[in-house]
Image (spheres, rainbow, N blue to C red):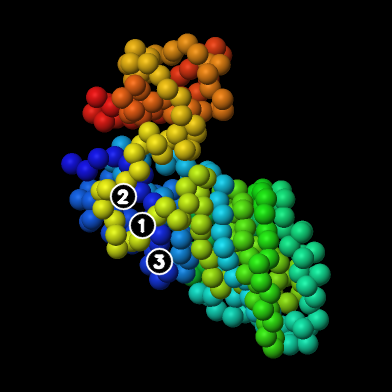
């Protein structure tokens, strides 16, 4: 039986996140694998998978901040806000040429910080029980409510001008739930020329980096990150004694709420095994997630 752990995969372009999960299931010989946030087929980069009992950790990873490297093409809009869609509008070359670097910087500033963002109409958000992209592909009108997100960094690394278009290479730090293609759409709309995403690579989820990931063709059990290490990276490690570990596994509270530096902690027993994730309850600590008993024995 495969041991539990977190698997970091560098997803290639042209395949779905589910395709990568399927590859991992075949490579590791288990169906109990989940992921902490999908990437579109066009996108590449970091995909965090949970294997066996470590799938319980995905709840604490999925909401982590993320970093993306992307290319935005100004001057052309598409119905999907990315290069996989159909062109819906193209600005004339003179209008695009009149967009200055200063105007681009001002437009990006408007999309930085805490903002309300309307997700792309082809997102996976459910509308009355159906995915938005399913409704869009069926030709139905899709109206999605704006969501409050935070873009803490939106930096331009390069500007490449061609007749009728401007390509921007950017890096974005953002909260979970941010749609980079919606940033491309809104930047282009704000500049009056339209825009869409032509490349996207996720390089970070919380404390996990794509540099530490394996390729989709190199998935093997030795690539798994131990649950205690992974949980410690996500919520911070909290060493507990053998007696405290036993009590937590049995659903009991333990003393020592003041030992917790953040809202959550990864309780790790003296043998280095992850007991679970705990939170402060007054002066005590209580488990909000325990690893399966057979893993922690």
Residue 3: image quadrant is top left
**Residue picked out by circle 1:** 214
Residue mark closest to the camera, 2 vs 3: 2
Residue 81, image x, y percentages = 59, 70
Residue 152, image x, y percentages = 67, 50
- Height in image: 205 above or below 197? above
Spatial CA distance of label 2 from label 3 is 17 Å
Q: Earlier in the sequence, mark 2 or mark 3?
A: 3
User: Residue at left 65%, top 62%?
Assistant: 183
Whether residue 220 can be seen here: yes
Question: Considering depth in this image, is 154 or 192 the residue closer to the camera?
Answer: 154
For label 2, the crowd category at 10 Å Cα-Cα, with few meaning under 14, some 14 to 19 and many 20 or more, is some
In the displayed structure image, the side of residue 7 where residue 101 appears, left or right:
right
- Height in image: 67 above or below 142? above
**Residue picked out by circle 2:** 223
The reply to whether discs 1 and 2 touch (Cβ–Cβ < 8 Å) is: yes
Residue 271, image x, y percentages = 31, 25
Residue 55, image x, y percentages = 35, 41
Residue mark closest to the camera, 1 vs 3: 1
Residue 250 — which label? none
- Height in image: 211 above or below 107? above
Q: Secondary structure at mark 3?
A: loop
User: Residue at left 41%, top 39%?
Assistant: 230
For label 1, the crowd category at 10 Å Cα-Cα, with few meaning under 14, some 14 to 19 and many 20 or more, is some
Q: Secondary structure at mark 2?
A: helix
Q: Earlier in the sequence, mark 1 or mark 2?
A: 1
- Location of the C terminus by quadrant is top left
Spatial CA distance of label 1 from label 2 is 7 Å
User: Residue at left 38%, top 26%?
Assistant: 268
Q: Earlier in the sequence, mark 1 or mark 3?
A: 3
Whether residue 79 can be seen here: no
**Residue picked out by circle 3:** 12
């Amino acid at each position: 039986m495969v041991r539990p752990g977190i698997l970091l995969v560098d997803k290639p372009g042209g395949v779905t996140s589910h395709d990568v999960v399927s590859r991992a299931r075949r490579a590791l010989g288990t169906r109990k694998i989940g992921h902490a946030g999908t990437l579109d087929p066009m996108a590449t980069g970091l995909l965090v998978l949970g294997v066996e009992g470590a799938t319980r950790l995905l709840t604490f990873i999925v909401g982590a901040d993320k970093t993306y490297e992307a290319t935005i093409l100004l001057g052309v809009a598409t119905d999907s806000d990315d290069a996989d869609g159909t062109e819906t509008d193209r600005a004339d070359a003179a209008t695009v040429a009149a967009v200055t670097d200063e105007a681009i910087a001002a437009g990006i500033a408007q999309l930085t910080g805490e903002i309300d963002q309307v997700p792309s109409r082809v997102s996976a958000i459910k509308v009355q029980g159906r995915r938005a992209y399913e409704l869009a592909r069926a030709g139905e009108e899709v109206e999605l409510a704006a969501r409050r997100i935070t873009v803490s960094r939106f930096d331009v690394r390069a500007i490449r001008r061609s007749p009728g278009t401007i390509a921007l290479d950017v890096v974005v730090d953002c909260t979970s739930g941010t749609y980079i293609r919606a940033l491309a759409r809104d930047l282009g709309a704000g500049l009056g020329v339209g825009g869409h995403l032509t490349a996207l690579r996720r390089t970070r989820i919380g404390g996990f980096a794509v540099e530490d990931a394996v390729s989709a063709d190199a998935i093997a059990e030795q690539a798994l990150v131990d649950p205690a290490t992974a949980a410690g990276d996500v919520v911070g490690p909290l060493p507990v004694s053998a007696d405290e570990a036993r009590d937590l596994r049995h659903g009991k509270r333990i003393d020592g709420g003041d030992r917790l530096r953040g809202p959550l902690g990864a309780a790790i027993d003296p043998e280095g095994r992850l007991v679970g994730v705990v939170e402060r309850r007054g002066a005590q600590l209580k488990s909000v997630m325990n690893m399966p008993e057979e893993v922690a024995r």
